[in-house]
Image: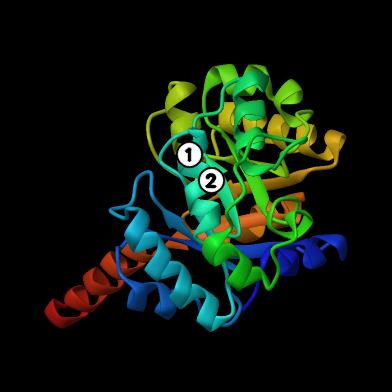
Amino acid sequence: MATAFALREKWAKGETVFGLFASLPCGFSAELIAAKGVDYVCVDQQHGVCDYKDMVEMARGIDARGSVALTRVPANEGWVIGKSLDAGAQGVIVPLVNNPAEAAKAAAACRYPPKGERSNGPARAALVMGSRDMKVTGDGILCFVMIETLEGLEKVDAIAATPGIDGLYIGPSDLAISLGLGQGLDRDEPEHVAAVAKILAACKKHKIIAGIHTGSSRFAKKYAAQGFNMVTFGGDATMLRAAVEREVAALTS
């Protein structure tokens, strides 16, 4: 089974990791998208139709296929984060982090004392990681906080300096909405480009991972070339819908 250390090893070599989001509550669909070349699959408990029980089954499928199982938790709540990590998620992406205090809260939920406040009980995590050592199940997992609001953008440097977080993950659509540009993932408006560049610069300054969500391989390659270390290039639901629409169009053309 691949663990967070597989991603850490690639980053240590200067490589970018590419992944997908899974929002369909099905272990089989998670297995299908954990294909060769997909470094991670993130089970989306925030905007997807997946709950905790779904996430566990999906993580098992992702593990079996050799991708790293992450999860976007529904909220920055310690018990939600800890429960997901104990179930074997190799890292969390925490939404709507607006300031250093909220970033510190997310980090504390991921790390054991004295670095944080996470309760020790790694249940399935110890099986996945092959150890109950807190340096493995605590320090080894990944903690990403999302920058997707004007406040988060304004305070991004202080957020990036927060001890215990591994990186920042950009939510480009919510960021675009905050900038008054409307919804949508792949953006090229000057204001959005500048905001993304500011977040990337903060990550580089503080030597943490820069992650971003995209809706296409074209934008994924673009951001990787800019220096992003972690790039999501799509999701199961959108890809399934696009494939069906393409085939239906072919039938009727």
Residue 203: percent from left, percent from top: 77, 38
239 over 199 or under it: above or below: below
Query: CB of mark 1 within 8 Å of CB of mark 2?
Result: yes
Residue shown at the point (55%, 57%) measured from the top left? 232
Residue 80: percent from left, percent from top: 45, 42
Look at the numbered disc 2 and give the secondary structure of its residue.
helix
Q: Identify the residue under disc 2.
A: 82
6 over 215 or under it: above or below: below
Say which quarter of the image contains residue 69. Answer: bottom right
The amino acid type, in three-letter code, at marker 1 is Trp
* Distance from the alpha carbon under mark 1 to that under mark 2: 5 Å
Q: Identify the residue under disc 1.
A: 79
61 over 14 or under it: above or below: below
Q: Residues within 10 Å of mark 2 (few under 14, many from 20)?
A: many
Observer-nearest of 24 and 140 = 140
Residue 141: percent from left, percent from top: 68, 54
The amino acid type, in three-letter code, at marker 2 is Gly
Is residue 52 found left or right of 154 in the rendered image?
A: left
Q: How many marks?
A: 2
Residue 220: percent from left, percent from top: 59, 58
Q: In the rendered image, which quarter contains the N terminus?
A: bottom right
Task: Report whether residue 141 is seen.
Answer: yes
Look at the numbered disc 1 and give the secondary structure of its residue.
helix
Residue shown at the point (37%, 65%) measured from the top left? 236
Is residue 248 found left or right of 227 in the rendered image?
A: left
Task: Report whether residue 217 is seen.
Answer: no
Is residue 246 found left or right of 220 in the rendered image?
A: left
Q: What label sits on residue 68 in the rendered view?
A: none
Residue shown at the point (22%, 69%) measured from the top left? 245
Observer-nearest of 157 and 240 = 157
